[in-house]
Image (spheres, rainbow, N blue to C red):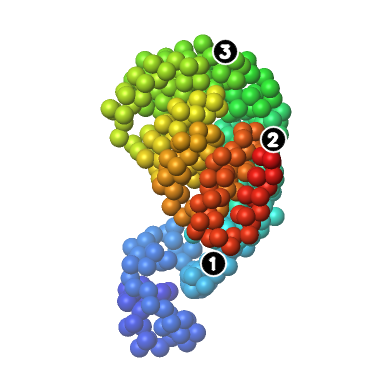
Amino acid sequence: MNLMKLILNKFSFGKLKTINTNSNYISMIQKTNFHSKSKLLPNCNQVNNKKYESKFSKRNFYSNFRVKFSELNDSESSSSTKSKSSKTLIEQSNDYSTLALSYYKLDKFTEAVKNHKIALDLNPKNVKSLLQMGFIHSKLKNNSEAIDYFKKFLELVPYDYIARNRLVDLLITQNKYDEALIHSQKELEFAPIQFRSECLNNMATIFKNLGKINEAINCYNKAIKIDPKNEANLTFYNSLALLHEEQGDLSEAINTYKKAIELFPLNSNVKLHLAGLLESVGRSEEVTNLIKSVINTETDIAILHEGFFNLGYRSFLRNNFSGAETYFLKAIEYNPNNTICRMILLEILLTNNNLNDIENQYKKIVELFPKITRFHLVKLCRQVSQTTKINLRLTTEYFLKLELEANPKNEEAIKILEELNQKIN
């Protein structure tokens, strides 16, 4: 007991090296670096209390102290091993899922897929990995794999409307409209009100592809009613008007565009779409007024180009070549690089059989296609004559003669000219 008191009275263990007592005990004490505030041992006053006497008898004190010291010494070295061994399969799966997400953010999709697969091997119901695998395969255009993962995810989390929306998009791209419709209806069930317009838009697309036009029209009308003054809904107005037009109900299509213009009077897109529809039914005066309105207010060149291109194309389809030429030239003014626009305009110019105007046509074509040769024009003339069933002999002959003046030895041009002369005779 004297030894015990001595130790506790001189609790700074560094001083105990001079004490001659049990060598094993002293050796153990010397190896420690604990100071007097150590929580492993009670303070001196506590030792004098009776309730501590038996607990801190010499033998018990030694054994207690050795155990505590051993545990503390091993705690750092064994903490990582303990944590690893004690982790469940679910926790390990989550770790791999987190690692995979880090790879995904770095655009390292191969590593991301590899780690997600490990995560799913450990826990097939790891919803984070199932969802991420859906998005990764979707990004990589592996649509079938993406669909499978989204389905597995939605079996576990049926209320996730964003994942279901992506699944619907993928099913539409694979023309699986019946299945897409089922998921689209579930999507609408769980989606918040601000997202329902998009759900209805998907549903309308599905119905349209299933040939159920009336159901598609109902979906667009419902989408518009959710937030009629939201300019983002102009897409629905355009789609709705086009459906009415496809159904042959031009009056309803025109009224739909006019409703949109009433709500959004500054939107040029709607005005140009309406102008195109009015052009197709020959209401030229209204078209002119709408175009003037657009040119006076719109500054976006891309919108102006698209609008005039659509007007030109509608005019071309109803054989109003004069109007089409005017609109296409305007479209080229806003976007000189539109090859389709130029080619249609070239066809329009080549269909004119007025001999007096052939030279003017030629000048216009050269302006549109600075690198074109006369011989190329001859070939184009022949193509146009085959597709439009219009006799382009005079125009072809004119260009052939120009070509032979410049290149008298062009054998193919000579051959074509001879064919034309034979037909005349």
Please report the residue visible at 41 percent of the width from the left and 74 percent of the height from the top. Answer: 4
Label 3 sits on residue: 249
As drawn, 162 above or below 272? below
Q: Return the x and y of residue 260 as percentages of the image width and height.
A: 41, 18
Mark 3 Cα within 10 Å, few/some/many (few <14, many 20+)?
A: few
The residue under the point 55% across, 53% down is: 375
Q: Tell me which corner region of the image, top left, top right, bottom left or bottom right, holds residue 121.
A: bottom right
Sequence-wise, the earlier of marks 2 and 1 is 1
Quarter of the C terminus within the rendering: top right
- Label 2 residue SS: loop
Across and down, in percent, residue 213 comes to: 64, 18
Neighbourhood count class around disc 1 (C-alpha, 10 Å): few under 14, some 14–19, many 20 upward: few
Which residue is painted at 57% across and 58% down in the image? 109
Residue 329 or residue 36, whichever sits in front = 329
Say whether residue 155 is left or right of residue 74. right
- In front of the other: 351 or 241: 351
Q: Is residue 8 visible to the viewer in this orientation of the structure?
A: yes
Q: Quadrant of residue 263?
A: top left
Q: Quadrant of the N terminus?
A: bottom left
Going by the numbered disc 1, the residue's amino acid type is Ser
- Amino acid under label 3? Asp
Residue 7, disc: none
Looking at the image, residue 140 sits to the left or right of residue 61; the answer is right
Q: Is residue 61 above or below residue 383?
A: below
What residue is pinned by disc 1? 80
The Cα–Cα distance between marks 3 and 2, rounded to whole angstroms, is 27 Å
Q: Which residue is mark 2?
A: 175
**Toward the viewer: 186 or 86?**
186
Please tell me whether residue 67 is drawn above or below residue 119 in the rendered image.
below
The picture places residue 418, in percent across and down from the top left corner, at 66, 50
Three-letter residue code for mark 2:
Asn
